[in-house]
Amino acid sequence: MRDEINYQEFMAIRNKILLKVIQINDSFILGIYQGRLSDYDLLIKFRQRSETTRSGWSRIRTPKHIHWTVDLLIKMSHYPELTRSLVLYLISMWEHTNPNSTEDQRNDSLQIENFINDNRREIGRYLDLNTKGEYSVKFLLILAKLIMQQEKNNRSDAYMFIQLLEKIRDGGDIFSVISKATHKGR
């Protein structure tokens, strides 16, 4: 049996205001912090279960676009149609994500439990994708929602996330997708 974890302490970072901790499953924990780019900026961090560390968990990491992109490319190589359907769903999520302009809106956007309940069907629909890549669909959907919210809160003309999704949707070659994910291509 695993030790009980105080998630607030486990995800605490000195000089960062922790807004929310979400245990995704037995392998991933997300921390959402107040960012510094805008009043409603979100800083997203995670820990992943690791058998190679003494604590059994990775250090606190920042998810990068390249991480979820590579994961989707791995899934795409095994389940092209199902992954493309997930990408289309993510594009739809982008189109329906609005920036936060009040504290109440931000608090609502951080009600991840509601998001999970609202997306239970999609999480189930894409379960086969959990067998490939590093991330579960549940983790990807939650991470995508938070990154979308983060981008839209900070810049009304945010484009990185959606351009990556469109490049994957359109069957971009691996080099152009990776270049886009590492901010080297437009």
Image (cartoon, helix red, strand yellow):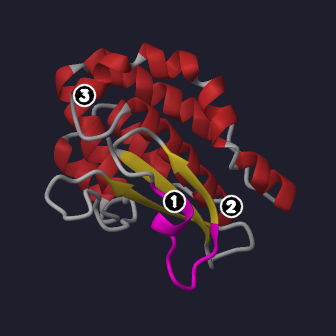
Q: Position of residue 69 (x, y in %)?
A: 31, 46
Classify mark 2: residues with Cα within 10 Å, few (<14), some (14-19) or many (20+). Answer: many
Residue at x 59%, y 67% (from the top left corner) = 33
Residue picked out by circle 2: 153
Q: Nearer the viewer, residue 111 or 77?
A: 111
Judged by depth in the image, the label closer to the viewer, 1 or 2, is 1
- The quadrant in which residue 104 appears is bottom right
The boundaries of the magenta stretch are 5-18
Describe the element under mark 2 as helix, strand or loop: helix
Q: Residue furthest bottom?
A: 15
The span from disc 1 to disc 3 (Cα, nearest Å) is 36 Å
Residue picked out by circle 1: 6
Which tag, 1 or 2, sits closer to the chain's start? 1
Classify mark 1: residues with Cα within 10 Å, few (<14), some (14-19) or many (20+). Answer: few
Describe the element under mark 1 as helix, strand or loop: loop
The N terminus lies in which quarter of the figure?
Answer: top left
Is residue 154 shown left or right of residue 70? right
The span from disc 3 to disc 2 (Cα, nearest Å) is 29 Å
In the rendering, which numbered label is found on residue 76? 3
Is residue 87 shown left or right of residue 77? right
